[in-house]
Image: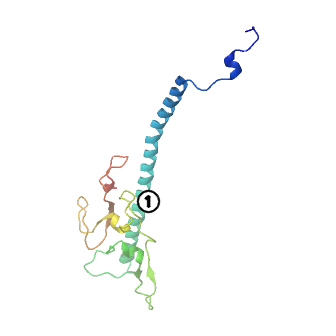
Amino acid sequence: MTPFQPSRRARLGSGGFTLIEMMVTVAIVALLASVAVPMAELAVQREKEQELRLALTQIREAIDAYKKAVDEGRIPKAADASGYPPSLEILVDGVPDPKDPDKKRKFYFLRRIPRDPMARDDALVAAADTWGKRSYASPADAPEEGDDVYDVYSKTEARGLNGIPYRQW
């Protein structure tokens, strides 16, 4: 071999990665994956929590609008009734306007009942049944269903990222 002649390895080019280079690459990829997976799970949970907040707000605003309509006399109520809707479905189905002579006009409070995003994904269960319902007569610390729907809550026993159970949101 002359001093200006390239070595055999340089003439053939590098034959690939060494075992050590491959091990280092695999270790780096594994480290990045171990950081990315929990971050992705956290992002999914945050998204579900945002959906829960939005759904609770929509349903509670609809319940309040129904109660306000009753208090204003736009919807008739029985003397012994609380003025809250008898079910969540009535917020979507509508309430006939008693002042309409043709009885065709209705008051609507929701387009659809949102599903509880924390509930198990069972397509056979109606959206209204994914929520826990509290009647006006039941106490806040032990909510029970009754003749009306005063409030809704998530039925799940899980806790949010803030440490508060979803049932208490």
Q: Residue at x 25, y 62 (%)?
A: 143
Examine the rendered structure and indicate whether residue 134 appears above or below residue 105: above
Q: Residue at x 45, y 36 (%)?
A: 34
Q: Residue at x 36, y 67 (%)?
A: 124
Examine the rendered structure and indicate whether residue 81 appears above or below residue 11: below
Kind of residue sitting beneath label 1: Leu
Examine the rendered structure and indicate whether residue 153 appears above or below residue 25: below
If the image is split into quadrants, where does the C terminus sit? bottom left
Could you tell whether 3 is left or right of 102 in the image? right
Q: Nearer the viewer, residue 71 or 57?
A: 57
User: What percent of the width, then of the height, locates residue 148?
Assistant: 29, 72
User: What percent of the width, then of the height, locates residue 137?
Assistant: 24, 69
Q: In the displayed image of the protein, which residue is found farthest to the bottom?
A: 101
Could you tell whether 15 is left or right of 136 in the image? right
Instruction: Kindly state the secondary structure of the residue where label 1 is placed.
Output: helix
Among the 4 quarters of the image, the one containing residue 41: top left
User: What percent of the width, then of the height, locates residue 8?
Assistant: 68, 16
Q: Residue at x 49, y 35 (%)?
A: 32
Mark 1 surroundings: few (<14), some (14-19) or many (≥20) residues within 10 A: few
User: What percent of the width, then of the height, locates residue 90?
Assistant: 37, 76
How many marks the image carries: the answer is: 1
Residue highlighted by disc 1: 54
If the image is split into quadrants, where does the N terminus sit? top right
Q: Nearer the viewer, residue 88 or 10?
A: 10
User: Colour scheme used in the picture?
Assistant: rainbow
Q: Nearer the viewer, residue 66 or 124?
A: 124
Q: Nearer the viewer, residue 169 or 113?
A: 113
